[in-house]
């Protein structure tokens, strides 16, 4: 029996159709295999696809929002380039390429609120306990900070150390350049006094 | 058996505990910790600017999400937030892992509760007079809270106030972080981003 789950968050509405996977011991109300899905974005055409397509969409949107929340602007695309998202002039351009021939790629401009709606809608599906599907995208956690630190040039990592060494050596040299005060020996001082 | 061996060889949580224990003994905060608590407190200030009664919601939410053992009252929440070095009266000691996690969860739940208001402020399609008024009110309150609670002599705080002159960019980014912090996966997203510097938002 075909099961249906609906998730609605603001501008995004997602319908997922599937069946239980009895080989894994799922009960009659649990979706174990996704047959197809429909994503309704208000003001845009309805998107449809199979499990692989939504997996790609989830992985791309998740990775992109993780960059956005860290303040990094980047473009992310799926392995097969069927879904890609990038930032463009204070908005986000979501591009979807159909696997069928003769269908032109679809480009959707989303503002921040719409992207947040889409992310939360996809979150509802991922964290739904009645949908037991192995989402590959969740395991593909991107270590953004690690990636960013690896990308940063090597000289920037050591700039503070270099400045410290430079300041220390400069101050040491300046200290050495200061002439030491000439101390009069006691005998010389007495002689001076006598002469006076 | 092999698994047991592996767990004794490498356990990141244990490693983190040792580091945090040493930090607590020395009474110091690392740059990463300072950065995280600074960002967390600024986001909580933004929540307070979104809704004028947010402090009441914080108190009620701590009971709802079972955080009474960490935050039995609002004063404890405030004390944890005072670990932010940008505060007027800040505490130099590092924040405990437990309090930090609780603040993180609290922020995520608050974002979820105020998501409709945050979304309304973020939306570019809502540009009628009412929304413009709500936006200007938010900016005014946020600016007021920053100058009231944070030490305006600090360069970072001065920068927040400089950015408030062009609130469309900096404040919208703060609100976008809040929007993405809500929902089921919001806490994970927020946790992964907290150690990133705020300067990336500018």
Image (cartoon, coloured by chain):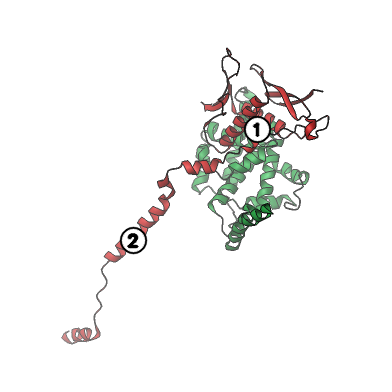
Image height check: is B140 above or below B5?
above
| Colour-to-chain, red | A
Kindly identify which chain the residue marked by label 1 belongs to: B
Specify the farthest residue to the top: A102
Disc sitting over residue A10 in the figure: none
Residue A155 horizontal side relative to residue B3, left or right: left
Query: x%, y% of residue A71?
Result: 54, 37
Label 1: which residue? Answer: B118
Comparing A3 with B80, the one in front is: A3
Name the residue at 56% across, 36% down: A67
**Among the 4 quarters of the image, the one containing residue B183:** top right
**Among the 4 quarters of the image, the one containing residue A131:** top right
- The answer to whether tags 2 and 1 share a subunit is no
Q: Is residue B48 visible?
A: no
| Colour-to-chain, green | B
Kindly identify which chain the residue marked by label 2 belongs to: A
Residue B180 horizontal side relative to residue A180, left or right: right
Specify the farthest residue to the left: A195
Comparing B86 with A190, the one in front is: B86
Disc sitting over residue A171 in the figure: 2
Give the number of the mark in front: 2 or 1: 2
Q: Is residue B71 visible?
A: yes
Query: x%, y% of residue B9?
Result: 62, 56
Name the residue at 82% across, 29% down: A29
Residue A157 horizontal side relative to residue A179, left or right: right
Specify the farthest residue to the front: B1
Name the residue at 62% across, 31% down: A59
For the residues labelled 2 and 1, the Cα–Cα distance comes to: 53 Å
User: Alpha-carbon neighbours of circle 2 within 10 Å: few (<14), some, or many (≥20)?
Assistant: few
User: Alpha-carbon neighbours of circle 1 within 10 Å: few (<14), some, or many (≥20)?
Assistant: many
Query: x%, y% of residue B17?
Result: 63, 57
Regarding mark 2 in the picture, which secondary structure is present there? Answer: helix
């Amino acid at each position: 029996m075909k099961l249906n789950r609906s998730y609605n968050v603001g501008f995004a509405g997602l319908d997922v159709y599937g069946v239980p996977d009895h080989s894994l011991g799922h009960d009659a109300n649990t979706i174990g295999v996704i047959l197809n899905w429909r994503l309704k974005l208000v003001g845009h055409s309805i998107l449809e696809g199979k499990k692989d397509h939504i997996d790609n969409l989830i992985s791309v949107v998740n990775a992109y929002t993780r960059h956005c929340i860290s303040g990094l602007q980047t473009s992310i695309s799926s392995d097969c380039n069927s879904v890609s998202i990038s930032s463009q002039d204070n908005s986000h351009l979501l591009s979807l390429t159909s696997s069928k021939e003769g269908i032109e790629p679809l480009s959707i401009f989303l503002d921040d609120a719409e992207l947040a709606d889409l992310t939360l809608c996809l979150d509802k599906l991922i964290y739904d306990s009645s949908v037991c599907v192995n989402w590959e995208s969740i395991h593909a956690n991107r270590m953004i900070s690690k990636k960013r630190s690896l990308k940063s040039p090597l000289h920037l990592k050591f700039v503070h150390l270099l400045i410290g060494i430079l300041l220390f050596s400069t101050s040491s040299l300046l200290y050495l350049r200061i002439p030491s005060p000439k101390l009069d020996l006691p005998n010389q001082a007495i002689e001076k006094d006598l002469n006076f | 058996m092999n698994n047991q061996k592996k767990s004794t060889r490498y356990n990141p949580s244990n490693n983190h505990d040792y580091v945090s224990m040493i930090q607590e003994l020395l009474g110091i905060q690392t740059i990463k910790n300072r950065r995280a608590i600074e960002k967390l407190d600024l986001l909580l200030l933004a929540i307070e600017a979104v809704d004028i009664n947010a402090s009441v919601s914080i108190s009620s939410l701590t009971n709802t999400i079972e955080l009474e053992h960490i935050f039995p009252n609002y004063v404890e929440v405030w004390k944890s937030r005072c670990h932010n070095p940008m505060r007027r009266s800040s505490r130099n000691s590092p924040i405990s892992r437990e309090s930090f996690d609780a603040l993180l969860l609290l922020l995520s739940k608050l974002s979820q509760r105020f998501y409709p208001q945050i979304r309304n402020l973020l939306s570019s399609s809502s540009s009628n007079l009412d929304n413009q008024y709500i936006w200007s009110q938010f900016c005014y309150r946020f600016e007021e809270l920053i100058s009231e609670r944070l030490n305006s002599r600090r360069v970072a705080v001065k920068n927040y106030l400089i950015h408030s002159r062009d609130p469309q960019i900096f404040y919208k980014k703060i609100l976008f972080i809040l929007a993405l912090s809500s929902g089921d996966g919001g806490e994970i997203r927020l946790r992964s981003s907290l150690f990133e510097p705020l300067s990336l938002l500018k």
